[in-house]
Structure formats: C-alpha cells, structure tokens
Image (cartoon, rainbow, N blue to C red):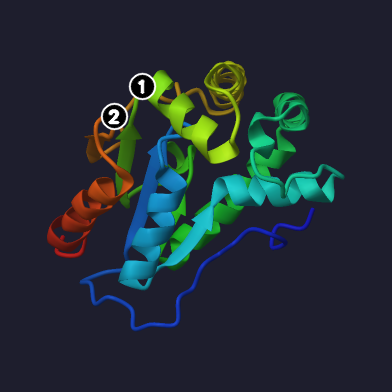
Amino acid sequence: MGLSEGSRMFSPGRRRVKAQKPVVVCIGGMAGSGKSTLARRVAEKYGLDYLSGGDVLRALAHHEGYRSSRCGWWESEEGMRFLGERGKDKRFDKAVDAKLLQMARRGNVVLDSWTMPWLLEGGFKMWLEASKERRAERIAKRDRIGFRDALSALERKEQQTKAIYKKLYGFSLGDDLTPFSFILDTNNLEGGEVYQIVCMVMTNVVLTS
C-alpha cells in the first residue's frame, strides 16, 4: 500500500517556531467540523508539518482502485463502500495510525486525526464541537449537494466510523472527549473566528508549555 501517495504532508518553507520542546498537536472533530482546514492553516502559520489521517486513507483507497480524489468522495456511495471494507479489514486503519504515530515521534507536527488523541501519549489535543445539523450544512455547501442528502450521508458515515474505532481500539469517537485539553464549540463561529481562537491557544498555551 502506497502511504506516501496523496497523503499531503505539508512542510512550509518558512522558519519554524521556537518552542521549549518539539510540538505535537492533534486536532479532532467529526466530519464537517472544519478540523482539516484549521489544521492546515495552523501548520502553515507556525511552520509545522501537517499530516491528515483522512488523506492517508484516501491514498490507500486510491491504491485499492477507488476514485478517492474527487470532492465529496467520503459521502459518496463509493466512499461508503470503502468504509464498509475498512470495517472488515483492519489493515487500512492500522497502516494509517502507524504513519501518524511515526510523524508524531518526529515532533513539530499538526495531526488531523480521529485516532491520535487516544493512541498518542502526550501532545496537545483539541476537539472542534459542532451539531450534526450544522456540520451537514457545511458539507452540503462544500460538496454542492442538498442538506438532506448531506445529513443522511453524514449519519451513515458516522455510525460506521464509530463502530470501526470502537471495535479496533475501544474508544467512543465523538462521545468520549476525555483525551482533549481544549474543546471549542464552533456552532456559532465562522472559520476565521475558530482560527483566531486556536492561534491564541497555540501562542499562549501550546508553545509556552
């Protein structure tokens, strides 16, 4: 399986931040919470590497013959079939998590991941909270589909995804938030406002600890 293909590790060509020790940040949140966009922006601002568990999974799906590069693929029927395959074959998620843990050991990285908050010891872990309806609105706008279609796909995807991680690792995705140092309710916030708040946390908490 080609882990590097399409995995989008982002290494900006700018001076890295100076911290007392290597920085490892995990950003989590259910689909439509804005975690991927936020993680990329935070990595760019602070000169950190970026790795997305979802992007690595897309690369693995592509390697298996799926057309995973198109917009809205996760919510498509093909994306749901791959989700079903993951439920039967743990090698996909195990490969992704091994890659993410490898990057975490190197340090100075932002991980966009559902599993790392539970599997990784240490690091600063953030969770973006948003209602299912609010997230469905965002997905509908992003993928240019109807709200009901987005909500239906979201519910199906989350049910299966939660079952995968419960079976594989024993944690309850989206319900058990104990690993997180910072939880932000984004229901009434725009993306720029979320970014500003998280940058304040990065500057005043993460980089000074």
Image spot of residue 207 (x, y percent): 20, 64
Q: Secondary structure at mark 1?
A: loop
Q: Residue at x 43, y 58 (%)?
A: 40
Q: How many marks?
A: 2
Label 2 near label 1: C-beta < 8 Å? yes
Pick the front one: 35 or 96:
35
The picture places residue 61, in percent across and down from the top left corner, at 76, 44
Amino acid type at mark 1: Ser
Q: Which mark is residue 187?
A: 2
Horizontal side of residue 60 vs 122, given as left or right: right
Which residue type carries mark 2? Asn
Residue at the image position 53 percent from the left and 28 percent from the top: 169
Q: CA distance from mark 1 to mark 2?
A: 7 Å
Is residue 108 at all visible to an observer of this figure?
A: no
Which of the marked residues, 1 or 2, is nearer the chain's N terminus? 1
Q: Which mark is residue 131?
A: 1
Viewer-side residue, 72 vs 84 = 72
Residue 206 in the image: x percent, y percent? 21, 58
